[in-house]
Image (tube, helix red, strand yellow):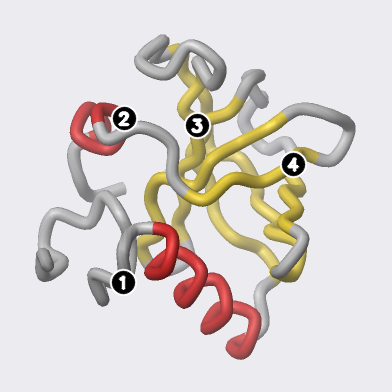
């Protein structure tokens, strides 16, 4: 994934999701099909992760890996993976929610170092 992991985590949690099976996560990076979330638990490589938000379609991710960061105490793990099912209209809603959550900066994704800044 592109971008600085430390920079993403230093800004704190992004758009909040509930995890299937219990727990919470926050979307901190979305670049193409790749995502990074801060989560309250780790996921092994290859595991399916399903994150839900009341206003959005479920975010289904195949996990690439997890690591403990500890930068956000309630969400100590950075989980990276690839979106496996997201229709174009669902992606548009997700991007709009991210933009609204981050003050409408217009960037495709928080954490994208090449994205324009407000």
Instruction: Identify the residue position indicated by label 2 in the image.
Output: 9
Relative vertical location of residue 63 with respect to residue 51 in this rendering, above or below:
above
Q: Are marks 4 and 2 in contact (CB under 8 Å)?
A: no
- Sequence-first disc among 3 and 1: 3
Instruction: Identify the residue position indicated by label 3 in the image.
Output: 38
Instruction: Identify the residue position indicated by label 1 in the image.
Output: 104
**Residue at image location 31% in from the left, 71% down from the top:** 104
Mark pair 1, 4: CA separation? 23 Å
Q: x, y percentage for residue 69?
A: 39, 14
**Residue at image location 43% in from the left, 36% down from the top:** 13
* Local crowd size for mark 2, using a 10 Å CA cut-off: few (<14), some (14–19), many (≥20): many
Q: x, y percentage for residue 37?
A: 50, 39
Relative vertical location of residue 71 with respect to residue 104 in this rendering, above or below:
above
- Sequence-first disc among 2 and 1: 2
- Sequence-first disc among 3 and 2: 2
Looking at the image, residue 51 sits to the left or right of residue 112; the answer is right
Q: x, y percentage for residue 118?
A: 12, 67
- Of 46 and 85, which appears nearest the observer? 85
Instruction: Identify the residue position indicated by label 4 in the image.
Output: 18
* Local crowd size for mark 3, using a 10 Å CA cut-off: few (<14), some (14–19), many (≥20): many
* Local crowd size for mark 4, using a 10 Å CA cut-off: few (<14), some (14–19), many (≥20): some
- Of 51 and 62, which appears nearest the observer? 51
Query: In front of the other: label 2 or label 1?
Result: 1
Q: Secondary structure at mark 1?
A: loop
Q: Secondary structure at mark 2?
A: helix
Q: Residue furthest front?
A: 103
Query: In front of the other: label 3 or label 1?
Result: 1
Q: Are marks 1 and 4 in contact (CB under 8 Å)?
A: no
- Label count reads 4
């Amino acid at each position: 994934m592109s971008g600085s992991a430390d920079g993403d985590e230093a800004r704190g949690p992004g758009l909040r999701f509930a995890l299937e099976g219990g727990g919470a996560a926050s979307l901190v990076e979305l670049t193409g099909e790749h995502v990074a979330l801060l989560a309250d638990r780790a996921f092994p490589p290859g595991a399916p992760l399903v994150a839900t938000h009341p206003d959005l379609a479920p975010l289904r991710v195949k996990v690439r890996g997890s690591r403990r960061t500890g930068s956000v105490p309630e969400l100590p793990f950075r989980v990276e993976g690839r979106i496996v099912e997201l229709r174009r209209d669902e992606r548009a809603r997700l991007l709009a929610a991210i933009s609204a959550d981050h003050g409408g900066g217009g960037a495709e994704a928080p954490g994208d170092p090449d994205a324009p800044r407000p």
